[in-house]
Image (tube, rainbow, N blue to C red):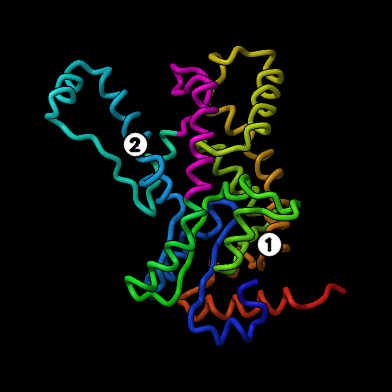
Amino acid sequence: MLYDTAKIWQNAPSKRVMLFGMSGLGKTWASALLRNAGWFHYSVDYRIGTHYMGEHIVDNFKAEAMKNPFLAELLKSDSIYIGSNITFENLSPLSTYLGKPGNPTAGGIPFDDYVTRQRQHAAAETAAMGDVPHFIDRAGRIYGYDNFVCDTSGSLVELVDATAEHDPIMDRLAEHLLPVWIEGTEAQVEELCARFAAAPKPMYYREPFLRTLWDDYRAAQGGLSPDAVDPDAFVAWGFRRLIEDRLPRYRAMANRWGVTVASGDVAALRCADDFASLIVGALAQAATPPK
């Protein structure tokens, strides 16, 4: 690890961390707290949505606008401009582009198109994670930031293989910052599942897992045809299976490359000093041999 001990962390003139884990457990909230305390905040989802998938997102908006004759004429004459107003806190343009597979009358898109967009997202996220060392450098060199927080996507775990001898993403990242897993409780997992069921949103899946999920869901529904699948019902049905699949891999990432903090402790943070103290405890715990 970049900071092998709590003492090294405490004495380091530059503190650099990467927050990872399930969406909804405080990654962006903690990152914003640190940003307000003078840390550089690198949002992976923002980088994906603006730099790597911005054109895809805007083209999708334009394709919808072209279905309206009034807007189509204005677009073709360059009379109107359509853009994506994505922010750190509002990633809806990216989610809308990813979409959900299934019945088009219910807002779904063809499964093959969905897979294509999933592949685009995987490539974009891989590239955005590869940009982290560059942003660490420019944050200090150009803007004078000593401290850096990387706010990752919940789907980072889908790009990493903690069982491989060498993982190209995490091996490189661990040279530049400290990976910090925000671990949720079983009750929080249940809360996230209930929240997701009430308002399903687009997700990223590893392709083999996605294809199995798609086939299993359609079979469980009596062999539904792809264009008869309710998009919201499908993603809500698969969410718990996705979380159960991700949790042990999050844990493996933390055990191999970083440290673990409890989501409740993250929620209790009130300042950057609280965060620094939380990392001290996590590093001390990681250095303690299991009984």
Give the x, y percent position of residue 263: 60, 63
Q: Residue at x 54, y 79 (%)?
A: 276
Magenta part mainly helix, strand or loop? helix
Q: What are the residue bounds of the magenta stretch?
A: 98-127
Disc 1 marks which residue? 254
Give the x, y percent position of residue 79: 11, 29
Amino acid type at mark 2: Glu
When the figure is inspected, residue 270 is found, relative to residue 101, above or below; the finding is below
When the figure is inspected, residue 170 is found, relative to residue 103, above or below; the finding is below
Give the x, y percent position of residue 133: 48, 63
- Label 1 element class: helix
Disc 2 marks which residue? 55
Q: Residue at x 61, y 43 (%)?
A: 193
Specify the quadrant of the image occupied by residue 32.
bottom left
Neighbor class of circle 1 (other Cα within 10 Å; few <14, some 14-19, many 20+) is many
When the figure is inspected, residue 280 is found, relative to residue 62, above or below; the finding is below
